[in-house]
Image (spheres, coloured by chain):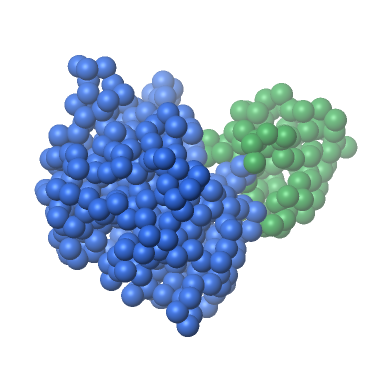
């Protein structure tokens, strides 16, 4: 099962521990995290469910390509990193 | 008189309290984070909107016991297929203003990109006012300085009838609902827009309403700081006449209305709009006490040498007495008056850029 970890910059606002979840796409893995931590969703996704403009998501060392549909595939040993993009803020 | 007010800044929320005749910073929250709007109830409840650069707009509430909790932020519904050509995003950009709705538990939030949201449970949950958002004319609203999105900068609730609502839109004119938001009309007549082609100068929807302020005791009296002038309405925002006596300039963002005297209001003029600095580098407040026929320029205690403070639209406030005023600037300047603006003092603080100043309800 893929692992999802979050930037520590979120710690000022809420708890976002690393989680190992079911899911074969970035979107499915994130949805599994948000199912148990619904308050986290709005920090990562906008109202339409797409990645926030200034949030970057990597699968291992690759920046995800589909920021709208979140369809990038993930395998059971993959690490998903949700980070602050070096913009905005 | 209010002994407490909040200052929403680029780097946190500051609460100032009056003790032994002086104003002190009594509390700091969200240090380091942009705070875009604040509302403090008489019972000690405080609402604060954050505008986080990476993580979006958030909403927090302090309960009367002093504990802060995050609330669900207003959110737009899924964007339908027939809205594909909507020029504005269906996603919350920033909460610009939070207002009490005149009914227990009810709040209104004006936002960028132009959504008006309503809560009936003290901010725990919010619903988009779809009747307004789905009006075809709403798509003609246009962006304001510093952003591409239009914003609802003012929500006025008639103190005699909480179902009667007026909103100011930058840029989009004044809109009214007489049925708690179920239907809306663009009502303003009499304003003009210097930034439009001549044929379209007087279009109601083209008017950049920087901020509206209403006299609480005479709710039909509404004042407007517009992008290119100062206006007053005696019929709840339907017809407007320009107050050409405003000095030292007619550009600005902020306006405050006296809570009881329908002829008194305050403005903070600036050099228009390409420069956006105080005229001659002097910070002043313009006050009228005769309905706008004449203005006094108040400067006692305000910086008069090389001061380049700009005062945003939510950064001038008057308390329920009409005697205490406060305003804050883009340079972090913060000034207080306890005599209706005749004289000003500066609390001992050098604050971050100020977005909003607001007295607690009393």
Give the x, y percent position of residue A43.
62, 46
Image quadrant where one finds the N terminus of chain A: top right
Q: Residue at x 70, y 51 (%)?
A: A10
On screen, residue B72 versus residue B232, left or right, reads right
On screen, residue A38 versus residue B139, left or right, reads right
Task: Using the image, determine if residue B231 lies above or below residue B337.
Answer: above
Q: Looking at the rendering, which quadrant does residue B82 occupy? A: top left
Colour seen for chain B: blue
On screen, residue B203 versus residue A86, left or right, reads left
Q: Which residue is drawn at 29% across and 38% down?
A: B250
Image quadrant where one finds the C terminus of chain A: top right
Q: Residue at x 72, y 34 (%)?
A: A86
Task: Using the image, determine if residue B17 lies above or below residue A53.
Answer: below
Give the x, y percent position of residue B359.
40, 65
Give the x, y percent position of residue B319.
33, 67
Q: Which residue lies furthest to the right in this view?
A: A77
**Residue B101 in view in this figure:** yes
Q: Which residue is drawn at 59% across and 65% down?
A: B28
Give the x, y percent position of residue A14.
67, 57
Task: Using the image, determine if residue A6 lies above or below residue B350.
Answer: above
Count of number-bearing discs:
0
- Please state which of residues B304 and B167 is positioned toward the viewer in this rendering: B304
- Please state which of residues A80 and B171 is positioned toward the viewer in this rendering: B171
- Please state which of residues B296 and B75 is positioned toward the viewer in this rendering: B296
**Residue B47 in view in this figure:** no
Colour seen for chain A: green
Q: Which residue lies furthest to the bottom in this view?
A: B20
């Amino acid at each position: 099962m893929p692992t999802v970890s979050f930037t520590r910059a979120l710690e000022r606002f809420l708890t976002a521990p690393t989680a190992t979840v079911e899911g074969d796409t970035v979107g499915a893995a994130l949805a599994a995290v948000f199912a148990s931590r619904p308050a986290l969703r709005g920090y990562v996704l906008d109202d339409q469910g797409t990645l926030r403009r200034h949030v970057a998501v990597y699968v291992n060392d690759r920046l995800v390509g589909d920021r709208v549909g979140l369809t990038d595939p993930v395998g059971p040993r993959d690490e998903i990193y949700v980070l602050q993009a070096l913009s905005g803020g | 008189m209010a002994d407490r007010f909040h200052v929403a800044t680029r780097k946190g929320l500051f609460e100032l309290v009056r003790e032994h005749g002086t104003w002190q910073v009594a509390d700091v929250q969200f240090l380091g984070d942009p705070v875009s709007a604040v509302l403090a109830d008489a019972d000690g409840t405080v609402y604060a909107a954050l505008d986080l650069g990476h993580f979006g707009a958030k909403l927090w509430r302090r309960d009367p016991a002093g504990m802060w909790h995050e609330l669900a932020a207003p959110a737009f519904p899924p964007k339908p297929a027939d809205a594909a050509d909507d020029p504005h995003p269906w996603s919350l950009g920033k909460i610009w203003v939070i207002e009490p709705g005149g009914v227990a538990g009810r709040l209104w939030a004006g936002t960028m990109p132009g959504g008006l949201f309503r809560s009936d449970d003290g901010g725990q949950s919010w619903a988009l006012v779809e009747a307004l958002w789905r009006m075809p004319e709403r798509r003609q609203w246009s962006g304001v300085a510093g952003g591409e999105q239009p914003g609802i900068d003012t929500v006025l609730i008639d103190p005699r009838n909480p179902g009667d609502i007026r909103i100011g839109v930058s840029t989009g004119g004044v809109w009214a609902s007489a049925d708690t938001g179920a239907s809306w009309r663009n009502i303003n007549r009499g304003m003009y827009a210097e930034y439009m082609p001549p044929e379209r100068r007087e279009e109601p929807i083209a008017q950049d309403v920087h901020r509206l302020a209403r006299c609480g005791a005479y709710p039909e009296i509404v004042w407007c700081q517009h992008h290119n002038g100062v206006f007053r309405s005696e019929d709840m925002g339907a017809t407007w006449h320009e107050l050409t006596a405003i000095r030292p300039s007619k550009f600005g963002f902020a306006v405050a209305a006296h809570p009881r005297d329908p002829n008194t209001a305050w403005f903070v003029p600036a050099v228009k709009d390409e420069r956006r600095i105080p005229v001659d580098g002097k910070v002043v407040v313009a006050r009228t006490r005769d309905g706008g026929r004449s203005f006094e320029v108040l400067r006692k205690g305000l910086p008069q040498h090389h001061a380049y403070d700009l005062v945003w639209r939510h950064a001038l406030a008057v308390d329920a007495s009409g005697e205490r005023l406060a305003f804050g600037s883009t340079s972090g300047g913060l000034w207080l008056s306890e005599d209706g603006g005749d004289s000003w003092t500066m609390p001992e603080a050098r604050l971050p850029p100020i977005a909003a100043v607001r007295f607690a309800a009393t």
